């Protein structure tokens, strides 16, 4: 299969080349030339995330140099559970995606991308620099996935003062081939610096660059697998489609659910939960799509004012009316996040992170207006990463999972960086 740009000015490109480049030459995002179609029967005999992933992703890898490596890539990347857990209310479930090494769903895509790029990196003397802007969880997942891989360097940018203390500690806890930069500004400033570098032709000539943000196909494609596994498991047990409420900021996780449904998985409705950054909610309510400066919220990993993957939504649904008819988006305030954290604990005995709490609020609003069927909240991060938010609300400490505890025990260091492209460019060239 070949891949083209959302902006239509790039020749069809092999998957491996698209993975290595990150961003298309015309500044757009890579998308498949066509979407494959599956029947539920195509997944007969598959249960594990790695087996489902190898079958699901095979058409996208067809004809590529990585095709024969796909099963091994899936086994390497998908080596922790992503359970679909029933909640103590009929029809309500939670899809737990935080059991990886950095306790966030970003581990799944980051580990897959790292496994792909490691196999493509044949020239150790010409190191590939992987750039990643993070609003909290992505950077640590990418750093962990790429840490000490030969021929690969990672540069993480995060907005100084706008991530949780434990997220900040994780981001700076790697060293070696991982450089962590704390940027004066917002996540949007970090994302802007990364995109400027990826579009800098002269810089590319001197320094091979790629991206590990959700603009990367290597992050997006594997995220379809946990939606496939959960929906297939539910279909096999109940014979009905599973609906999802997805917390989203940059739209990568949401787009993975949308594509999984489009290629034939038994997924019903998809509702998206955002925080007080209302760009998507306002658009889906009928307003213009109007990116704006991001606001700091309790669900900081979703503090995005210009969602990169909106281009891919436009590619999939060119007409605004069609796009608005397909999905629902609700914005959730900090006060509503706090209430949902308390409510989830009281009703289910579950502790949700602020991002997952946005999904619970949206699900409750859907149920209140009469929505039926089976729904799954997508739990994107372990609540222990946000103890400064969660623990005061519940009046109890949150146990820290072993992998996160090990990261928090490491020393941490991040370099300050002005939100200035010239300064950032010089830092990249200085290595």
Image: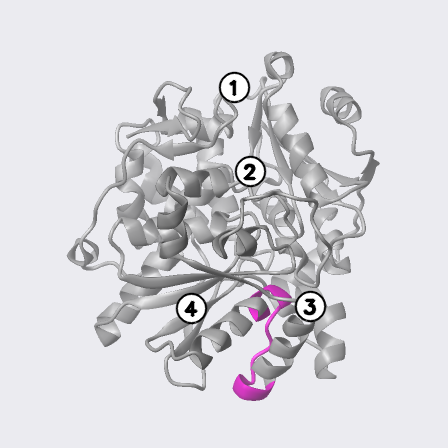
| Residue 362 vertical position relative to residue 220 in the rendered view, above or below | below
Question: Which of the marked residues, 3 or 2, is nearer the chain's N terminus?
Answer: 2
Question: Which of the marked residues, 1 or 3, is nearer the chain's N terminus?
Answer: 1
- The label on residue 49 is none
246 and 103: which is toward the camera: 246
Residue found at x 19% / y 58%: 40
Distance of mark 1 from mark 2, alpha carbons?
A: 20 Å
Question: Which of the marked residues, 1 or 4, is nearer the chain's N terminus?
Answer: 4
Write down the residue under mark 1: 123
Let me know if residue 142 is in the magenta part. no
The answer to whether the residue labelled 4 contacts the one labelled 2, judged by CB atoms less than 8 Å apart, is: no
Q: Quadrant of the C terminus?
A: top right
Question: Which of the marked residues, 4 or 2, is nearer the chain's N terminus?
Answer: 4
- The label on residue 334 is 3
For mark 2, give the secondary structure.
Answer: loop
> What is the span of residues highlighted in magenta in the rendered image?
346-357
Q: Position of residue 50 (x, y in %)?
A: 35, 52
Q: Position of residue 163 (x, y in %)?
A: 73, 54
The answer to whether the residue labelled 1 contacts the one labelled 4, judged by CB atoms less than 8 Å apart, is: no
For mark 4, give the secondary structure.
Answer: loop
Residue found at x 60% / y 12%: 205
Residue 306 image-quadrant placement? top right
Question: Which label lies toward us, 3 or 2?
Answer: 3
Question: Which of the marked residues, 1 or 2, is nearer the chain's N terminus?
Answer: 1
**Which residue extends farthest left?**
41
Write down the residue under mark 2: 212
Q: How is the image coloured?
A: one colour
Write down the residue under mark 4: 83
Question: Which label lies toward us, 3 or 4?
Answer: 3
Distance of mark 3 from mark 2, alpha carbons?
A: 29 Å
291 and 80: which is toward the camera: 291
Distance of mark 1 from mark 4, alpha carbons?
A: 38 Å
């Amino acid at each position: 299969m070949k891949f083209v740009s959302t902006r239509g000015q790039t020749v069809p490109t092999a998957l491996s080349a698209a993975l290595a480049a990150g961003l298309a030459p015309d500044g757009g995002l890579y998308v498949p030339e066509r979407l494959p179609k599956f029947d539920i029967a195509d997944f007969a005999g598959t249960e594990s995330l790695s087996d489902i992933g190898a079958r699901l992703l095979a058409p996208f890898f067809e004809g590529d140099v990585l095709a024969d490596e796909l099963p091994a890539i899936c086994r390497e990347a998908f080596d922790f559970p992503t359970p679909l857990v029933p909640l103590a209310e009929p029809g309500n479930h939670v899809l737990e995606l935080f059991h990886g090494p950095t306790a966030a769903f970003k581990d799944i895509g980051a580990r897959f991308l790292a496994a792909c790029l490691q196999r493509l990196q044949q020239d150790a003397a010409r190191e590939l620099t992987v750039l990643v802007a993070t609003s909290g969880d992505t950077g640590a997942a990418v750093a962990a996935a790429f840490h000490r891989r030969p021929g690969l360097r990672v540069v993480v940018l995060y907005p100084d003062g706008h991530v949780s203390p434990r997220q900040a500690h994780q981001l700076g806890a790697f060293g070696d081939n991982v450089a962590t930069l704390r940027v004066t500004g917002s996540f949007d400033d970090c994302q802007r610096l990364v995109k400027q570098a990826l579009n800098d032709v002269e810089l590319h000539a001197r320094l091979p660059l790629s991206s590990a943000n959700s603009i990367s196909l290597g992050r997006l494609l594997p995220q379809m697998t946990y939606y496939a596994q959960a929906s297939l498991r539910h279909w096999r047990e109940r014979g009905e489609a599973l609906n999802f409420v997805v917390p989203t900021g940059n739209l990568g996780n949401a787009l993975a659910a949308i594509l999984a449904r489009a290629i034939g998985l038994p997924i019903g409705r998809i509702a998206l939960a955002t925080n007080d950054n209302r760009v998507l909610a306002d658009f889906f309510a009928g307003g213009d799509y109007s990116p704006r400066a991001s606001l700091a919220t309790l669900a900081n990993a979703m503090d995005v004012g210009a969602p990169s993957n909106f281009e891919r939504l436009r590619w999939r649904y060119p007409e605004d009316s069609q796009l608005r008819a397909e999905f629902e988006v609700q914005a959730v305030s900090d006060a509503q996040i706090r209430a949902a954290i308390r409510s989830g604990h009281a009703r289910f005995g579950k502790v949700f992170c602020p991002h997952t709490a946005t999904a619970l609020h949206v699900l409750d609003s859907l149920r209140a207006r009469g929505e039926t069927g089976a729904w799954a909240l997508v739990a994107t991060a372990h609540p222990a990463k946000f103890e400064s938010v969660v623990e005061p609300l519940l009046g109890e400490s949150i146990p820290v999972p072993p992998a996160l505890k090990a990261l928090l025990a490491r020393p941490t260091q991040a370099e300050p960086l002005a939100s200035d492209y010239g300064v950032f460019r010089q830092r990249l060239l200085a290595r």
